[in-house]
Image (spheres, rainbow, N blue to C red):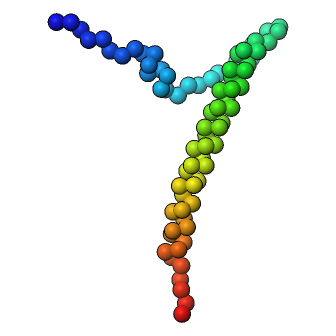
Amino acid sequence: MTSKRRGNNKERRGREERRFTVRGIRRDPPDIRKLSKALLGLAMAMAEAEREARAQQAARQPEAEATAADTEVRQG
């Protein structure tokens, strides 16, 4: 009987959330590539968080309007 190979761990790593860490080490000249990777990663994470917040707010807004319309009291 032959053993089955499982998927490569690298495939799973791509789907996981990535975290960036920046440590202050004095170098002369500074490593521009590392700094730019950190900055781009931070900007992408902030943009994704803002996009999710807007989507959640947009999803809540129609619900709030529907609830307000249902509870409106009509005088007549």
Furthest residue toward right: 28
**Residue drawn at the location 48% of the way across and 20% of the way down:** 13
Quadrant into which the N terminus falls: top left
Residue 36, given in percent of the width and then of the height, sits at: 72, 20
In this picture, is 68 found above or below 36? below
Left or right of residue 54: residue 15? left
Quadrant into which the C terminus falls: bottom right
In this picture, is 69 found above or below 14? below
In this picture, is 22 found above or below 48? above
| Whether residue 1 can be seen here | yes
Left or right of residue 48: residue 29? right
**Residue drawn at the location 54% of the way across and 72% of the way down:** 68
Residue 22, given in percent of the width and then of the height, sits at: 69, 20
**Residue drawn at the location 46% of the way across and 16% of the way down:** 10
Left or right of residue 4: residue 69? right
| Whether residue 26 can be seen here | no
